[in-house]
Image: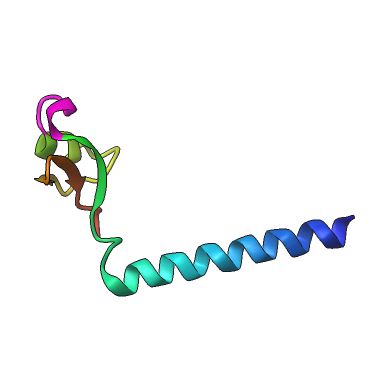
Amino acid sequence: MAASFSSTVCRILVVVAVIVATLSFYGAAKNVCILPCDKMVPDCDSWCRDPGFFGNGGNCYGGTCCCHPAE
């Protein structure tokens, strides 16, 4: 049972690592798109500048608020 569990966990970790590497390679992981811009209070850029979240502000792309992660 323990061997089966660790094998499953290892497979999940490998899949997650491949997805993160792929997104980073293509640049898709640069912005984190969260909610529609009209739901962001007070606005998308101010909400994304909150140090508890991203800190680098954000922009609306196609009506969706996308935050720029801290580098």
Can you say which quadrant of the picture contains the C terminus? bottom left
Label total for image: 0
| Relative horizontal placement of residue 70, taking residue 17 as reference (left or right) | left
Colour theme: rainbow
Q: Position of residue 33 (x, y in %)?
A: 25, 46
Residue at image coords 83%, 60%: 4
Residue 26, compared with residue 35, is above or below; it is below
Q: Residue furthest bottom?
A: 25
Q: Residue furthest right?
A: 1
| Relative horizontal placement of residue 65, taking residue 17 as reference (left or right) | left
Residue 29 within the magenta-colored segment of the rendering: no
Residue at image coords 23%, 55%: 31
Quarter of the rendering containing residue 53: top left
Q: Nearer the viewer, residue 52 or 29?
A: 29
Q: Position of residue 58 (x, y in %)?
A: 13, 46
Q: Position of residue 60 (x, y in %)?
A: 10, 44
Q: Nearer the viewer, residue 13 or 55?
A: 13
Quarter of the rendering containing residue 49: top left
Residue at image coords 15%, 25%: 41
| Relative horizontal placement of residue 25, taking residue 65 as reference (left or right) | right
Residue 58, compared with residue 36, is above or below; it is below
Residue at image coords 17%, 41%: 64
Q: Which residues are magenta?
A: 37-43
Residue 42 within the magenta-colored segment of the rendering: yes
Residue 1, compared with residue 20, is above or below; it is above
Q: Position of residue 27 (x, y in %)?
A: 26, 68
Can you say which quadrant of the picture contains the N terminus? bottom right
| Relative horizontal placement of residue 14, taking residue 3 as reference (left or right) | left
Residue 52, compared with residue 56, is above or below; it is above
